[in-house]
Image (cartoon, grey):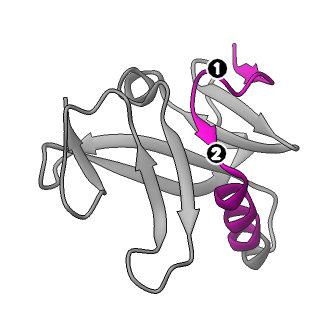
Amino acid sequence: MTETNQNQSTGINLTEAALEHVLKLREKQNKDLCLRVGVRQGGCSGMSYIMEFESSENIEKQDKVFEYDGFQLVCDPKSFLYLYGLVLDYSDAMIGGGFEFTNPNANQTCGCGKSFGV
């Protein structure tokens, strides 16, 4: 069964800036898509973050699903062990801009901010 989180103090949290940017990116796809976040082995520090749009038809019953003003953010259960409490932010700064992951589970983070170790 999927979990819809209306209380954004737990789980995976999107800032207003990240939500706004994700919605703009989704609009360019011209489809009603959700955002899947997760982790995989690799990167400078051992694990890398992944993010991709996908059809909500691909949501599995064991996935964690978080609602943000009707937009769904989805995470598989294994990745969720590493991403619980994550804050996903976005900055349009010319230097250092883009998506930023603040992960309370990471005990090390690489300089690029796209990978971490636990």
Kindly identify the residue that appears in the image at 37 percent across and 29 percent down: 104
Q: Mark 2 points at which residue?
A: 14
The image quarter containing residue 118 is: top left
Which residue carries the number 1 mark?
Answer: 61
Give the percent coordinates (x, y) of residue 75.
53, 33
Q: Which residue lies furthest to the bottom in this view?
A: 94
Quadrant where the N terminus sits is top right
Which of the 4 image quadrants contains residue 61? Answer: top right
- Going from N to C along the chain, the mark reached first, 1 or 2, is 2
Residue in view at x 47 percent, y 24 percent:
84
Residue in front for this viewpoint, 47 or 10: 10
Magenta segment boundaries in residue numbering: 1-26
Q: Which amino acid does label 2 sit on?
A: Leu
In the rendered view, tell whether residue 28 sits above or below residue 88.
Answer: below
From the viewer's side, name the closer residue of 114 and 73: 114
Q: Marks 1 and 2, Cα distance to the nearest angstrom?
A: 22 Å
- Label 2: state its secondary structure: strand
The secondary structure type at the circle numbered 1 is loop
Give the x, y percent position of residue 17: 68, 60
